[in-house]
Amino acid sequence: MGTGRLTGRRDQEATTVPDPSTAGSAPRSLAEALRARDDDGLGALLRARPDLLSPVPGDVTQLATRAGTRASVVRALDRLDRFALQTAEALAVGPEPCPYAVLESLLSGDTGTTSGADNGARAELPRALATLREQALVWGDDERLRLVRTARELLAPSASRPSPTGLGPTVAEATAGMSPTRIQEIVAAAGLPATHDPVSAVTALTGLFTDPERMSALLDEAPAEAHQVLGRLVWGPPYGEVTPHPTPPVRWLRDRGLLLPATARTVLLPREVALYLRGGLAHRATEPLAPAVPAHREHRPQLVDANAAGQALAALSTVEELVKSWEHAGPPVLRAGGLSVRDLKRAAATLDTDEPSAAFWIELSYAAGLLASDGEADERYAPTPAFDVWLELPPAERWSVLAAAWLTATRTPGLVGEQDAKGRTLSALGAELDRSAAPEVRRRILSLLADLPEGGSPDPAVVLARLAWERPVRGTSELRSRLARWTLTEAEVLGVTGRGALAAPGRALLEGRDPAPLLAPLLPEPVDHVLLQADLTAVAPGPLRRALAEVLAVLAEVESKGGATVYRFTPGSVRRALDAGHTAVDLQSFLTEHSRTPVPQPLSYLIDDVARRHGHLRVGAASSYVRCDDDGMLNEILADKRSAGLGLRRLAPTVLAAQAEPTALLDGLRAMGYAPAAESRTGDVLVSRADAHRTPARALPVPVPDGPPVPDRTLLGAAVRAIRAGDLAATAVRKEPAPSGAPGVPGELPRTSAAETLATVQAAALTGSAVWIGYVNADGAASQRVIAPVRVEGGFVTGYDHTADEVRTFALHRITGVAELAEDQV
């Protein structure tokens, strides 16, 4: 049979069948308009609105019906730019259908010219209209443009939902419930001849309001105050309150229908009157062109990259410090999930930053898979095994992991501390922080920065204005604006940008290239030495090698961070190193080896003094005990009032028993100024370094998709072929049934008896002709197919399925009926 397009089914707007005699005329339904598209046109629709592919429509009629559903239309409107949306809004308040010239005047004004009031709307209108047509929101030729019914219902003004244009109902809509006598009174007051019915009266009144010359003459008679009343309503909202006894100017306008009653106490300005007063404009200000995003400041690209590299290095240090601080006793997971406010404050104190910044670093570490919950009964957050792998990577590669996770994550730390719809506070690592639009906004921000000259940084306000133009729908625009502000801040602290400009590694990240080779030359080489000072501090003149940094982190406290980190040695930090198994000789040798300056005498004295006292007291498990060869020291401890809470009593001249647990006893004695050491059952000193806790292997958090994914070329091609094939079967023309039979309804499954079905397919197999069948598969899904049978046996028919473009076998008992094709379809 031929492969040409066959006639379709009849089903209201989306499914009206064109008259075969009018082939080549303008489409009369959305389905007909879609059927007239080529494969590229259908593919463009499915690419722009991927929700239409779930599941793949069976034919063009199903595609058109699905494209007109409320949820799909709302989603499509949310993704329009400002001028395309303004074009749709103008169509919603224009006539149905709307000629192109009328739409153009609604957007540029009756007097709009290329040198007059028009600000580019005329030149940009074809582009906006093409966007609406591509997304199947508008169909019809330029003389009969039609907005999809659902879109018109969403955008047209009503009493409960004002239009974004500020226009109100038409005269016909506003007078729908008005008495015929009152309508005739308005017609007479407006200077129009009386009519015999309300319909013609409303038509005459509408004709007056749409006639510029007669409207000008009518308004010339109006009082000056009446013009002021109209001026307050002309740009919306079109509703105004009136008293039971309105002022003379309001009565003058109301009597002539220039104001019509909406309720007992409100009046409205009819749409036709408002359009005349606006000069034909549907919007007060059309915005056909996207706001430009120029460079607000210019920086040397080398300075931008250097600044970004510094921020990247600080980001690595911050993430490492955060995750390591949770490897021994991480914060507990709340019952509802997430991190408590108290633990967030502790993390902020650990990182020496504020809580919003701490939330960002926590969420970034989680998105990169470096920390997660351990899944234990007493569930806590802890580093994952991936953290150990990450630590072994070169710095540039570690940063690439963080940056890639940030770019694609839907986690939104900026929401931490806010409340959800139920009044619950959103917590870091909680389940309600995903925002599917976040990755798109981040990529869009970086794309705008990438369009600037290298080293150029934009004005953030201009960037926000551009995003608002690209997605102007309220709600969508507000969320994108907040995401954009957070993105600009996060990109700077992460090192994707430097001084507001996109750095070279950030550009590579946006383009999908590995940023590590670009970042590596910008990072300083790790140093293997420190500079010891006489005031018990050490200065690290750059990032330290890992082995040196790990030992120094135990031996000293970080006093200040930056390009040169300052460490301070204290009795507590030295004792911590001794508790970890180091000896005084080890520490002295370590400092001598890694210091470019001699070890200061005060530092040597500090290490020796703490080491001399370290372990002099021994604490073990009895419940616990204190052992010391110096009975005088034990007497001193017993006499100290601060030891009362430990429950100490003497068991022997060198042993004290305690009611407190060993850990509490150690902490209590250290608080009193002693340096006790824990000992084992055999009397050996225990190394008190805790084992680092790790979670089981965890997969990376899965970003929440922003609707169905955009289909690739292969999927689009397959979907278009399936739709075309289904349309071929759905619109196949059958032979007329016998005079005694019931007439067939186009689009319905054929119904024949089992004997008729068998006889027809056998005859088709003998003659090599094609037939049209209705088929119900094992899942109960019904479909229509055009097949050419080649073999009928064993309760099955095998033939070439024109719908699927392949040979298939069908069970005869699942065929609902069969019909021969018309002669011109064979």
Image (tube, rainbow, N blue to C red):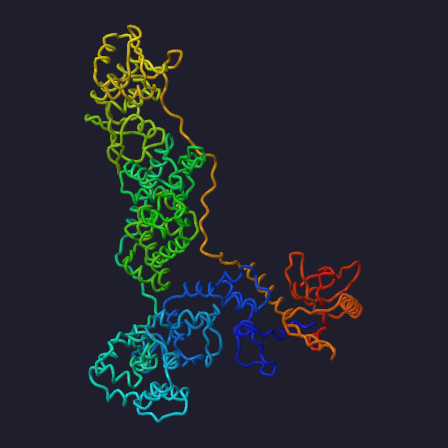
Residue 435 visible somewhere in the drawing: yes
Q: Quadrant of the N terminus?
A: bottom right
Q: Considering depth in this image, is 500 or 344 the residue closer to the camera?
A: 344
Name the outermost residue toward the bottom. 193
Is 491 in front, or is 539?
491
Residue 164 vertical position relative to residue 610 in the rendered view, above or below? below
**Relative to residue 378, is residue 618 depicted above or below?**
above
Q: Quadrant of residue 582?
A: top left
Q: Quadrant of residue 378?
A: top left
Q: Would residue 113 be seen by someone viewing this image from the given angle?
A: no
Q: Is residue 179 left or right of residue 142?
A: left
Q: Is residue 574 above or below residue 320?
A: above
Question: Picture coordinates of residue 246 (x, y %)?
Answer: 23, 79
Residue 159 percent across, percent down from the top left: 35, 72
Extreme top residue here?
Answer: 653
Report the label total. 0
Kindly identify the residue that appears in the image at 26 percent across and 14 percent down. 612
The x, y position of residue 444, in whole percent, is 38, 57
Residue under the image location 26 percent in, 8 percent down: 630
The quarter in which the C terminus is drawn is bottom right
